[in-house]
Image (spheres, rainbow, N blue to C red):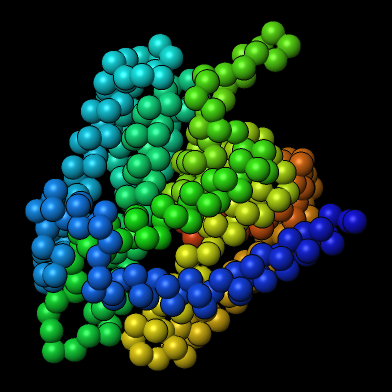
Amino acid sequence: MSPTSAGLLQVGLLICALAVVHRPLGDYLARVYTGTRHLKVELLVYRLGRVDPASEQRWSGYAFGVLGFSFVGVVLLYLLQRAQPWLPFDFGRGAVEPGMAFNTAVSFVTNTNWQSYVPETVLGHTVQAVGLTVQNFVSAAVGLAVAMALVRGFARQRTDRLGNFWVDLVRGVVRVLLPISAVFAVVLIALGVVMSLKSGVTVDGQEVAIAPAASQEAIKELGTNGGGVFNANSAHPFENPNSWSNLVEVFLMLVIPVSLTRTFGTLVGDRRQGRVLLGVMGVLWAGALAVVWWAEANGLRPLEGKELRFGVPASALFANATTGTSTGAVNSMHDSFTGLGGGRCC
């Protein structure tokens, strides 16, 4: 099969998978954020946080919750990095330098996930799992909560209440992000993504870093986060070993944004509006993909900076998906794209 045919097959499979889950997941998200019943684990969290789940907040209270929670997240993640020498699985990597720790804390709490360091040589597994992976969950849940507050602003009349931030946050983590990530972490492990608490393995006399990557890979794509366990991000064969894992990761980046259009239409009481949003998103995504794919396939150096395991089509597909969803994960280096392709995806 030619690279073009293989690329078109991947795009077709991706669109079919998104079409299958669009309606059920979109309706499920609508039920999650409008239901009045609470799970036992959620009630426990509310009790510990002294939150009344039946109360709703004005925009100012909701905004204060978002900002306050994010501020505490920055402080805790900063301190966790600075305390790394006293944590298990630090592998002697020492405390993260203050400026770098602050940059990383702000980056992950704001769902930016920009990394100015080599993760496999700077961070131990505890900071990766307890710090960064947890922030991948809660920062994505904050984004979902803000999206739901915006939708309620469109849908509600004669009220100044936008819901309860703490309820939206907990439900986003417990009912949406955790179960989907758990399933796809297992899928990624089955496809060859590493999941180990060892610091590395020796191959031909060279130490090769490994990590509990599958669990972070699933949520970093699903939550449109992007920070990698390894410096090469999703271009690393331990994070993205083959064409199937590549397709799964692209699917994870797109599945919630695509399904949220159905959620929007359901909550505002007019599903045609959701279909219009989905149509506009689809046209923009397809047009951008065509531009990036054509530019990279016809450039002077079409494979420079692209994973040779994937080639131009899969590199273009991943680049278009990660940029369109503001994820930040990469399976190829965007600064090595052609001017037209890189200008579109970056």
Residue 194 higher or lower than 225, as above or below: above
Residue 328 can be seen, yes or no: no
**How many marks overall?**
0
User: Is residue 266 toward the left or the right of residue 101 in the image?
Assistant: right
| Residue at 55% over, 81% down | 279
Residue nearest the observer in this picture, 192 or 291: 192
Residue 131 place in picture, x, y as percent: 34, 35
Of all residues, the one furthest to the top in this rendering is 205
Residue 188 place in picture, x, y as percent: 61, 45
| Residue at 61% over, 74% down | 19
Of all residues, the one furthest to the front in this rendering is 40
Of all residues, the one furthest to the right in this rendering is 1
Residue 265 can be seen, yes or no: yes
Residue 262 place in picture, x, y as percent: 46, 79
| Residue at 63% over, 54% down | 248
Residue 39 higher or lower than 333, as above or below: below
| Residue at 40% over, 11% down | 92
User: Is residue 8 toward the left or the right of residue 138 in the image?
Assistant: right
User: Is residue 121 toward the left or the right of residue 264 in the image?
Assistant: right
Q: Quadrant of residue 239?
A: top right
Q: Quadrant of residue 103?
A: top left
Residue 302 place in picture, x, y as percent: 77, 47
Quadrant in which the N terminus appears = bottom right
